[in-house]
Amino acid sequence: MHDFYISQQIAREVIKKAKMEKASQVTEINIKLGELTHLNPDQLMFWLKQLFRETLASGAKIIIAKVPFLIKCKNCGYEGKLQMSKDYDYYFYFLPPFSCPRCGEQNGVEIKSGRECVLEKIKIRR
C-alpha cells in the first residue's frame, strides 16, 4: 500500500513542478529507486500511470532506474553489493541483520546506497 502513497507524492511533485515551469506537457519522468525501499517498480509504474491520466503528464514516459544496495565495511574496506537472503521471514518489514561478505564484520558496515527514492528529472514541453 505504501507504493500508492509514494506514487501520489511523486505525481503531485511532477505536476507542481511542471505547472511552475508553465509546461504544456510532461514528456518524461526519471526516478531512482533503491533496493532497500521495498517499493515495487511495477506497482509504482502502474499507480503513476493511473494518477497521471487526464493531467499534463498523461502519456509521459516513466523511467525507473534501480539503485543497488551497496555497503562499505569500515573494518576491511570492502565496498560493493551485499546479497541478502530472500528466505529471511521479515525481509519486507524491516532490515535484517547483515555483515561484510569479506571479513564478517557486523557493526562497522555502512549503507552507501539503496535507500533512495528520488524524482531525478522531469522533461517538459512548453
Image (spheres, helix red, strand yellow):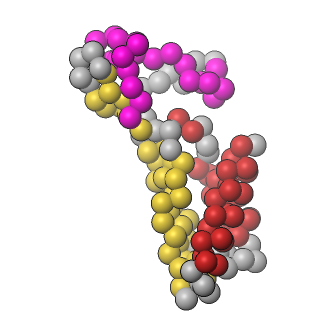
Identify which residue, 6 or 35, lies in the foreground.
6
Is 102 one of the magenta-colored residues? Answer: yes
Residue positioned 46% across, 48% down in the render: 66
Residue, far front? 20
Identify which residue, 85 or 80, lies in the foreground.
80
Residue, far left? 76
Residue positioned 40% across, 13% down in the render: 107
Measured as percent of width and height from the top left, residue 29 is found at: 54, 67
Above or below, 114 relative to 30: above
Q: For residue 53, which quarter of the picture?
A: bottom right
Chain part drawn in magenta: 90-112
Q: Please tell me whether the stretch drawn in magenta is mainly helix, strand or loop.
A: loop
* The N terminus lies in quadrant: top right
Could you tell whether 120 is left or right of 10 in the image?
left
Could you tell whether 4 is left or right of 122 in the image?
right
Number of marks drawn: 0
Q: Work out whether residue 46 can be spotted.
A: no
Above or below, 71 relative to 120: above
Residue positioned 63% across, 28% down in the render: 92
Above or below, 23 relative to 103: below
Residue positioned 34% across, 11% down in the render: 104
Q: Work out whether residue 44 can be spotted.
A: yes
Is 59 one of the magenta-colored residues? Answer: no
Identify which residue, 42 or 5, lies in the foreground.
5
Q: For residue 62, which quarter of the picture?
A: bottom right
Q: For residue 52, which quarter of the picture?
A: bottom right
Above or below, 41 relative to 105: below
Measured as percent of width and height from the top left, residue 14 is found at: 62, 67
Measured as percent of width and height from the top left, residue 51 is found at: 74, 65
